[in-house]
Amino acid sequence: MKYSNDTGLPEVFAKAVMRDTYTRGKADISATGLLKPPRQAFLAYQHDHEIVVDVSKQVWSLFGRAVHNVLEQGTVDGYILEQRYFAKSCGWTVSGQIDVQRLDPQGITLMDWKTRKAYAVMNGRESDEQQLNIYAWLMRKNDKEVIQLQIVNIIRDHSSFEAERNPSYPQREVVVTDIDLNKKGLSKKKYNHTK
């Protein structure tokens, strides 16, 4: 992918956007790549060198990368941060980088950081369940026992006023959502406001 700066944003901002260090490692496809419609994924792969995106359209991507970078500094015993796993399936190598693994005697809880709007937290996303269950599959392929899946939602547009007015609105700026492990279809997401 190539970047443009048609809006004339400061060069330091443009360079920060362009300095995306994400890689899927030595894999044919990543867990998040599997979530894209096949035609879209194929065309993006085939024409990656032709795609041009303006840096002004990458603000929230940059914000998400910054949040991940800061949270990586929060290392404590019993947790593994930002570890990539690989597995083979149907002749493809699939990879996924797991944001957080909480190690318990019974097994591992997988957590994924998401910076998103309150609306997305309230309505849930099928892709959350799919992504985390792909990570759980990767872990099983690497002889790791997963017992729980969670999304840690960092709500970028949280409104204290709306939280007071509407009990179905996320009551805190960070909400942990439990995700169904190994179940098909959309799950009913459960807010965990106490964590």
Image (tube, rainbow, N blue to C red):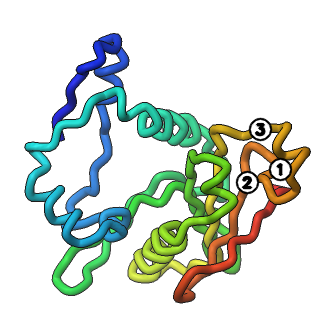
Q: Which residue is mark 3?
A: 159
CA gap between label 2 and label 3 equals 13 Å
Circle 1 packing at 10 Å, graded few (<14), some (14-19), many (20+), is many
Which numbered disc, 1 or 2, marks the residue closer to the eye? 1
Instruction: Answer with the quarter of the image where residue 46 lies.
Output: bottom left
Circles 1 and 3, Cβ within 8 Å, touching? The answer is no
Look at label 2 and name its amino acid.
Answer: Val
Q: Earlier in the sequence, mark 1 or mark 3?
A: 3
Amino acid of disc 3: Ser
What kind of element bears circle 2? strand
* Earlier-in-chain disc, 2 versus 3: 3
Name the residue at the right extreme.
164
What is the quadrant of the N terminus in the image?
top left
State the residue position of label 1: 171
Give how far across and how far down residue 61 sits, in percent.
Answer: 42, 39
Say which residue label 2 marks: 175
Rendering quarter of residue 28: bottom left
CA gap, disc 1 and disc 2:
8 Å
Query: Callout 2: 10 Å neighbours few (<14), some, many (20+)?
Result: many
Please name the residue shown 21% across and 31% down the image.
Answer: 3
Vertical placement of residue 93 versus 64, above or below: below
Q: Nearer the viewer, mark 1 or mark 3?
A: 3
Residue at the extreme front of the image, as rendered: 165
